[in-house]
Amino acid sequence: MSNDLYSVEQVADLLGLHVRTVRGYIRAGRLRAVRIGKQYRIARADLDALTGRPVPPARVPLLEVSSIVQVDGVDRAAADRLATLVLAGANTGHDPARPLRVQVVHDEERHRMKLVILGDPAATADLLRLVDAVLHGDNGLLSGEVHDA
């Protein structure tokens, strides 16, 4: 259940104002409030009317996943294709407020590639499934062998 009534202190914190300023708004009639005992309470709708915007929701703890994927046996061409695919997958179909961050490193001498993925657990899982399908599916990038020159 959301908090429908705010104290003067809570309104001051939400708006970045001093408590005296909020009390002044109440006395001047700019902010409607109900007096309960010796304290004022401000309804969410009245606060919205003052600001012209809804009150920001309480911050939900952010959950972020870090994943490092090492892919062996990858030549430069395959690494470039995989990097393009992973970056495209990271930039599409996810909540823009919580973007996935991806870094790609290819070690050409060792034919090794590392993908570092940071982001929302569900979006990260989707991207990891995409990587797995591309690498191990029919005609996957790792279906051919890499030969040292």
Image (spheres, grey):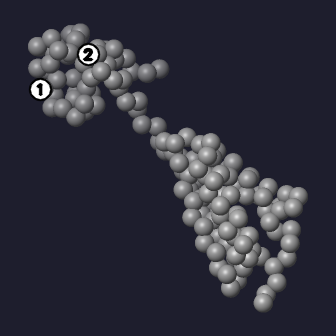
Residue marked by disc 1: 20
- x, y percentage for residue 40? 21, 15
- Give the vertical position of 126 relative to 56 (above or below): below
Q: Give 60 or 133, whichever is nearer the viewer.
A: 133
- Give the vertical position of 98 relative to 4 (above or below): below
| Residue type, mark 2 in image | Arg
- x, y percentage for residue 66? 58, 58
* Left or right placement of residue 49 versus residue 92 in this view: left
| Residue type, mark 1 in image | Arg
At x 79% / y 55%, what residue is drawn?
133
- Give the vertical position of 50 relative to 66 (above or below): above
* Left or right placement of residue 8 versus residue 99 in this view: left
Q: Give 136 or 9, whichever is nearer the viewer.
A: 136
Classify mark 2: helix, strand or loop.
Answer: strand
* Left or right placement of residue 117 versus residue 44 in this view: right
Classify mark 1: helix, strand or loop.
Answer: helix
Residue marked by disc 2: 41
- Give the vertical position of 120 relative to 103 (above or below): above
- x, y percentage for residue 34? 23, 9
Label 1 crowd (10 A; few <14 / some 14-19 / many >=20): few
At x 59% / y 43%, what residue is drawn?
94
